[in-house]
Image (cartoon, rainbow, N blue to C red):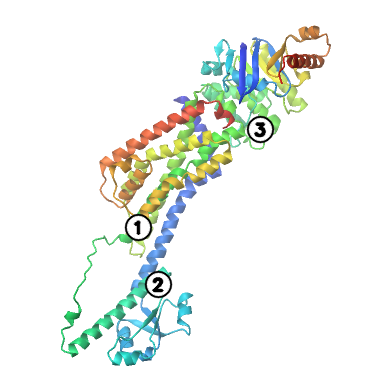
């Protein structure tokens, strides 16, 4: 389970997060959605321990990401915003490296790697060096290394960004599968259709604040709009109007 | 421990596949030895050729000084006719030197007045220095002998014209030239220490950040200082390899030089080279820690490359100066990383007995500074800015 409480963060006097709260439960897919620059990546980075909040807490299974860093890191699998590979390592070696960093090894690790390669359809390039991999191949490697330790919580930053239709669908199937195993999935996106197709819960973030939070059906009813894209635009516009009223530049 | 090992193993294998890392660790260190070999064969050949070979001298107006010519021939100097324009010939290197006997020389000589002789030389051409000095010495001897004979003819003891008899006693070892070459080793070795693993330092920190692989890496359950140490150890391994390769290359080069006929018998034995490698261990750690700190605080791969490209020049500078101006090692000098090692390496290469106190101080001081630097690097790795630059 992932909980975010009153998260605030500024970069050189620009307040990027202005108090973010939400919860992503086990056995659910939670979508964090918002326009570019809304604070999605910053929020996720605090959850996966590479950024520290100015105030507030980012909790994974009730461990604070900025205090019990290692405890949190053991419980999460991360597909970060940056998903660079090592050009001189093969796909399999990437997954093995991350597995070892999680304390895995031997036949058990190799078996897991084999299963992931099969599950993600990586057989063709598993033993090729990653230099020159396509976007889809790169993402599969990044996903495999994020999941090799079978984490209870999975955090994915824009997982289908830049993928073709077939690869996007494969990723969506994988996300559902992880949910069905009772694990917690939190992912960010700015593509409404994707969020609508996948999410059990939607958290809309805009300009560093949560402007809507609930199941898709709840949100539809609250805004009186039938289409989630309309819901999204409506919540953001309302937030911006409220903002102007509040005198924020 | 296991985590550090996993990171170390990954970075080592990754960089074994990198041509640039391999070049710096295996090929680059050999260049120094090759350069030294070339220099020795060139300089050694020059000295040998000039001191053994038959001398010849271009002379203009030889008819004016038949007695002198006879003396020169007796001393083994072959007389050759002078070029038309002696000055230009010497300036352009066509002739090493030309002896010009001016008109009227014979009359002055016969009248027992100082008879002028002009040696046209080019002092900027070092290769002619020995030849010219040999000719000048022969001319001086002739002048002295003739003078003494004239004094005797006048019934005067020639010794009264020599109030001083100057003897120089050379206490320098005959391996003076060899010592000069041996002094060139420390700067080469120091340079290698600061260059050998530099690509790993860049690749594993700035490179990792620029590739976007650092963010996923640091989300793994491993303490930041363990990541740093694993990467530092891989850099250490490559640097150590470079130093060992270089020492081997020097050893082989010395064998070749000693076997050759350069009159230079410089050949420190293998134990001296092993001692050098051991004394350099803490300094390698120092260099690696420094490189990682620079790579961590630099904003980009290119910036890191620029800084780390300049880094080796600074510590090898004192070594280069010591090639020409040797100094006596003091204990406080041993406390300065690189400076102490330069002096210690020089001493080992010259096969002088080791001063254990100096070695102990150098090793302790450099290890201590390295530990502090590594602590600083671990601190830098812990900052959020580590991942996103700046």
Query: Is the Cβ of the residue at disc 3 closer than 8 Å to that at disc 2?
Result: no
Q: Is the residue marked by circle 2 packed among few (<14), some (14-19), or many (20+) residues within 10 Å?
A: some
Comparing marks 3 and 2, which lies closer to the viewer? 2
Q: Residue at x 67, y 21 (%)?
A: A39
The one nearer the camera, B243 or A106, is B243
What residue would you read off at disc 3? Answer: A125
| Quarter of the figure with residue B145 | bottom left
Q: Chain of mark 2?
A: B
Q: Is residue B264 above or below residue A144?
A: below
Q: Quadrant of the N terminus of chain B?
A: top left
What residue would you read off at disc 2? Answer: B128
What residue would you read off at disc 1? Answer: B180
* Alpha carbon distance from label 1 to label 3: 57 Å
User: The residue tagged with tag 2: helix, strand or loop?
Assistant: helix
Q: Chain of mark 3?
A: A
* Alpha carbon distance from label 3 to label 2: 67 Å
User: The residue tagged with tag 3: helix, strand or loop?
Assistant: helix
Q: Is residue B39 above or below residue B288?
A: below
Q: Position of residue B293 (x, y in %)?
A: 48, 34
Q: Chain of mark 1?
A: B
């Amino acid at each position: 389970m992932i909980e975010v409480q009153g998260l605030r963060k500024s970069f050189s006097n620009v307040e990027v997060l202005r108090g973010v709260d939400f919860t992503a439960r086990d056995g659910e897919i939670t979508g964090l959605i918002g326009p570019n620059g809304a604070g999605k990546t910053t929020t996720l980075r605090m959850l996966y321990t590479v950024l520290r909040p100015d105030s507030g807490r980012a909790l994974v299974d009730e461990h604070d990401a900025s205090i019990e860093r290692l405890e949190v890191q053991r419980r999460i699998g991360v597909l970060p915003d940056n998903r660079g590979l090592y050009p001189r390592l093969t796909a399999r070696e990437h997954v093995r490296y991350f597995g070892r960093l999680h304390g895995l090894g031997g036949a058990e690790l190799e078996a897991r790697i084999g299963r992931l390669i099969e599950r993600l359809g990586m057989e063709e390039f598993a033993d090729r060096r990653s230099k020159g991999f396509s976007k889809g191949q790169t993402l599969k490697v990044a996903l495999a290394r994020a999941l090799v330790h079978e984490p209870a919580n999975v955090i994915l930053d824009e997982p289908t960004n830049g993928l073709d239709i077939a690869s996007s669908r494969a990723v969506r199937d994988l996300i559902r599968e992880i949910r069905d195993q009772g694990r917690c999935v939190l992912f960010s996106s700015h593509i409404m259709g994707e969020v609508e197709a996948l999410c059990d819960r939607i958290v809309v973030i805009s300009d560093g604040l949560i402007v809507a939070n609930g199941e898709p059906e709840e949100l539809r009813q609250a805004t009186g709009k039938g289409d989630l894209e309309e819901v999204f635009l409506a919540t953001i516009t309302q937030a911006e109007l409220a903002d102007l009223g509040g005198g924020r530049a | 421990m296991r985590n550090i090992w996993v990171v170390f193993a990954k970075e080592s294998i990754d960089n074994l596949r990198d041509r640039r890392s391999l070049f710096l660790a295996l090929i680059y260190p050999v260049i120094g030895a090759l350069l030294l070999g070339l220099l020795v064969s060139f300089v050694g050949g020059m000295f040998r050729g000039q001191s053994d070979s038959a001398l010849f001298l271009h002379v203009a107006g030889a008819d004016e000084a038949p007695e002198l010519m006879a003396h020169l021939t007796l001393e083994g100097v072959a007389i050759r006719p002078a070029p038309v324009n002696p000055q230009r010939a010497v300036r352009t290197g066509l002739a090493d030197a030309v002896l010009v006997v001016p008109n009227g020389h014979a009359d002055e000589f016969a009248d027992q007045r100082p008879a002028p002789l002009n040696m046209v030389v080019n002092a900027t051409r070092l290769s002619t220095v020995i030849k010219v000095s040999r000719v000048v010495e022969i001319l001086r001897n002739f002048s002295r002998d003739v003078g003494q004979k004239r004094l005797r003819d006048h019934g005067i003891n020639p010794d009264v014209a020599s109030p001083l008899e100057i003897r120089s006693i050379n206490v320098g070892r005959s391996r003076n030239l060899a010592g000069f070459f041996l002094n060139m080793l420390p700067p080469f070795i120091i340079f290698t220490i600061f260059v050998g693993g530099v690509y790993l330092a860049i690749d594993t920190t700035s490179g990792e950040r620029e590739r976007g692989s650092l963010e996923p890496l640091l989300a793994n359950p491993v303490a930041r200082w363990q990541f740093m140490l694993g990467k530092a150890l891989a850099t250490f391994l490559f640097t150590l390899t470079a130093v060992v390769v270089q020492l081997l290359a020097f050893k082989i080069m010395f064998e070749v030089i000693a076997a050759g006929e350069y009159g230079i018998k410089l050949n420190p034995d293998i134990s001296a080279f092993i001692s050098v490698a051991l004394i350099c261990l803490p300094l390698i750690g120092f260099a690696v820690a420094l490189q990682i700190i620079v790579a961590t605080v630099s904003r980009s791969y290119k910036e890191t490359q620029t800084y780390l490209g300049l880094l080796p020049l600074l510590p090898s500078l004192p070594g280069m100066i010591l090639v020409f101006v040797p100094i006596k090692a003091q204990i406080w000098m041993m406390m300065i990383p690189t400076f102490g090692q330069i002096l210690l390496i020089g001493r080992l290469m010259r096969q002088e007995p080791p001063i254990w106190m100096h070695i102990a101080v150098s090793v302790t001081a450099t290890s201590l500074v390295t530990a502090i630097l590594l602590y600083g690097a671990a601190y830098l790795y812990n900052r959020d800015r580590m991942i996103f630059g700046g």
